[in-house]
Image (cartoon, rainbow, N blue to C red):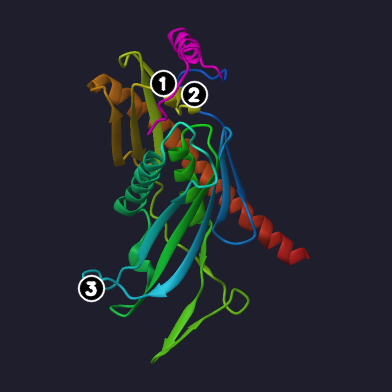
Amino acid sequence: MKELICSTIERNVVLKCIRDHKRLDCRAIEETRSVNIEFRAHPGYVSVTLGQTRVIAQASCRITKPKEARASEGHIRIHLDMSKIPLINLENWKHQEFVQELNGILEQNIRHSNCLDLESLCINSGELVWSIKIDLTVLNNCGNILDCANIATLCSLYHFRLPEVSVHGSEIRVYSSAERRARPLRILHFPINVLFAFFIDGRYTLIDPNSDEERLMDGFFSISMNQHKEICGIHMGGKLGLKKEQIELCKKLAFKKVLELTDRIRQVVTDYYKYVLQYLLFS
């Protein structure tokens, strides 16, 4: 999950800052970058920035057949596109591996955590279900694409509205929002991802690494957790073996961030739809 090429001067400067418990972007060791969330008129379309890392998410839906083993459950898929940004320090095949690794973590985080009630996507058991797709496009990479894309995915799901549908025999009718009010997806919890980077033989731990720090980190620890303190996923990489104390510190810092972001996502979506309602009432 890191680009490998880095000049000696750059390495020395970054590592000196870390030894002094400082960071080049003036953050504290345990401080994340600011998160900005912006919605567009289309439900499920959201732009999220983490510092200067920017990801756009777009949710869409289509009617399909369920899997035989899960006849009353819908589907969810995530597709990550990083073609619009250069990863100049990665060869083409490594670029593809990098994208696939991130996509896999994001899908596991959402699908395996059961944060979305898939049974609520059922139209007719054994015959018709909704399939939800989240298309993620990375527009700028200044480090920690994973956390930014995770926030964008959750915001998109929470902001999305599913059309009402009726089935009469073989006839399927999908109603427009003007005909029948579309309904929100049933989100059970928010599995929020928090990334940590380790430096200088694991002696220093940084939360939310930027692109310079990612190039120099000895290893990373990614934890996904919800507001109930349930761990939804863990991913590790690099050369280091982590001690129990390091993992406990990461869990503690991550939970604090999870509570903050969970409240933030709920609030921004609520505020958005309040604004839309007021606009419709007074326009």
Are the residues at dot 1 and dot 2 in contact (C-beta closer than 8 Å)?
Answer: yes
Determine which residue is flagged by label 3. 68
Marker disc for residue 90: none
Are the residues at dot 3 and dot 1 in contact (C-beta closer than 8 Å)?
Answer: no
What segment carries the magenta color? Answer: 1-24
Residue drawn at x 42%, y 75% is 63
Q: Amino acid at mark 3?
A: Glu
Determine which residue is flagged by label 1. 216
Q: Quadrant of the image for the N terminus?
A: top left
Q: Is the residue 217 above or below the residue 149 in the image? A: above
Q: Position of residue 114 (x, y in %)?
A: 32, 54
Q: Is the residue 213 above or below the residue 276 in the image? A: above
Circle 2: is it few (<14), some (14-19), or many (20+) Cα within 10 Å? some
Q: Amino acid at mark 2?
A: Asp
Label 1 vs label 2: CA separation?
Answer: 7 Å
Q: Is the residue 263 above or below the residue 174 in the image? A: above
Q: Amino acid at mark 1?
A: Leu
Element type where label 1 sits in the image:
helix
Q: Is residue 138 visible?
A: yes
Q: Is residue 210 visible?
A: no
- Name the mark nearer the viewer: 2 or 3: 2
Determine which residue is flagged by label 2. 212
Q: Quadrant of the image for the C terminus?
A: bottom right
Tell whether 134 sits left or right of 235: right
Circle 3: is it few (<14), some (14-19), or many (20+) Cα within 10 Å? few
